[in-house]
Amino acid sequence: MIQLICLFFPSFLSVWITEKIQKKDFKLKEFIYHFILYTTISNFLIFLIVYVMSNSSIDYLSGHIFTLLFTIKYLIFALCFACIFPFLFNILKNNFEFKVDVEEIKKRGRKPKQSNIVKDETKNERTKKAKTKK
């Protein structure tokens, strides 16, 4: 139970702060998007810090790592990240714009293939024209 609180509670806080910054209520789709984004980034960074700071290999998925002292440290880091990320993403959103232009690349020397339907129609039209000319 403590693991679930440590992993997901800070993300709820981040989404709530993001809603307050943007001054709107998120629909379910937006809420899930932001929740997954904040959960992934914050937990990745915290586990990276734990991996770098630990001297031995640790089984992160077992419940043995979540002692009382570790849980308190984890929550402190996670809550700090949860408060920082919404402001950071808002600054990035307001100051940077990402635009992607996609152009179609034409292959040289090749004619576009006609579909079978078009070929059948042209054959039928030829036979009709040939019959009308006779």
Image: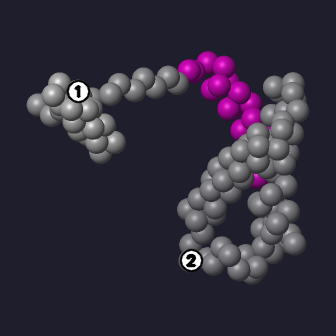
Q: Amino acid at mark 1?
A: Thr
User: Which quadrant of the structure image shows residue 2?
Assistant: bottom right
User: Which quadrant of the structure image shows residue 118?
Assistant: top left
Q: Give x and y (percent) for residue 134.
A: 15, 28
Q: Where does the magenta region start and end?
A: 76-97
Name the residue nearer the viewer: 5 or 71: 5
In the picture, the disc for residue 56 is 2
In the picture, the disc for residue 81 is none
Evaluate whether residue 122 shows in this view. no
Q: Nearer the observer, disc 2 or disc 1?
A: 1
Residue 88: within the magenta? yes
Residue at position x 72%, y 38% in the image? 85
Residue at position x 46%, y 26% in the image? 100
Inter-mark Cα distance, 2 to 1: 88 Å
Query: In this rendering, would 132 be left or right of 97?
Result: left
Query: In this rendering, would 43 be left or right of 30?
Result: left
**Extreme-top residue of the structure:** 95
Label located before the other in sequence (2 or 1) = 2
Q: Give x and y (percent) for residue 3.
A: 80, 69
Magenta segment's dominant SS is helix
Evaluate whether residue 121 shows in this view. yes
In the picture of the structure, the residue carrying the numbered disc 1 is 132
Q: Give x and y (percent) for residue 18.
A: 80, 34
Name the residue nearer the viewer: 81 or 39: 39
Name the residue nearer the viewer: 18 or 126: 126
Q: Is residue 15 above or below residue 45?
A: above
Residue at position x 80%, y 57% in the image? 8
Q: Give x and y (percent) for residue 84.
A: 74, 37
Label 1 crowd (10 A; few <14 / some 14-19 / many >=20) = few
Residue 113: within the magenta? no
